[in-house]
Amino acid sequence: MESDRSTAVATLLREAEGAHALYEADALNGVYDQDWPRWYATYAAEHGLAEVLGQDLTIDELTAFLAASYADFSLADPKPAEPWAEYTATRIASEL
């Protein structure tokens, strides 16, 4: 069911967000990670995204999708009501 997939993907993205915040703080000494979409994509892939979606995606495919979704989210007018993780999870569940 698409809503179950969306919920599971949103959970993965929120987990990635938390883990990435620690990565930026610790490994990057607080410096903004310009390559965050690849980090998130790798995290999601390593934590079961393929099983949730029922298909494999390459890190490059997912990186590009996450970056595009962030750009779309940032430029949307009006702004989406839901946070980025939920917005992107819904797109992943329906488009990939």
Image (cartoon, rainbow, N blue to C red):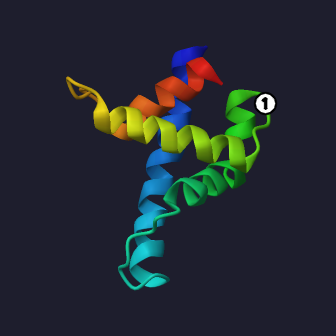
Q: Nearer the viewer, residue 28 or 1?
A: 28
Q: Looking at this rendering, what residue extends furthest in the top direction? A: 1
Tell me which corner region of the image, top left, top right, bottom left or bottom right, holds residue 61: top right
Which x, y percent locates residue 6?
A: 52, 26
Q: Nearer the viewer, residue 4 or 24?
A: 24
Residue type of the residue flagged with mark 1? Gln
Who's the residue at 78% across and 30% down the image? 55
Quadrant location of the C terminus?
top right
Quadrant location of the N terminus?
top right
Which x, y percent locates residue 74?
A: 31, 38
Who's the residue at 55% across and 22% down the image? 4
Tell me which corner region of the image, top left, top right, bottom left or bottom right, holds residue 5: top right
Q: Nearer the viewer, residue 58 or 14?
A: 58
Who's the residue at 70% across and 48% down the image? 60
Q: Looking at this rendering, what residue extends furthest in the right direction? A: 56
In the visual, does 32 lie left or right of 76?
A: right
In the visual, does 34 lie left or right of 83?
A: right
Q: Is residue 85 above or below residue 45?
A: above
Q: Looking at this rendering, what residue extends furthest in the left direction? A: 78
In the visual, does 69 lie left or right of 38?
A: left
Q: Is residue 35 above or below residue 3?
A: below
Q: Secondary structure at mark 1?
A: loop
Which x, y percent locates residue 45?
A: 69, 49
| Residue 5, visible in the rendered structure | no
Q: Is residue 95 above or below residue 55?
A: above
| Residue 4, visible in the rendered structure | yes
Q: Which residue is mark 1?
A: 55
Who's the residue at 53% across and 62% down the image? 35
Number of residue marks: 1
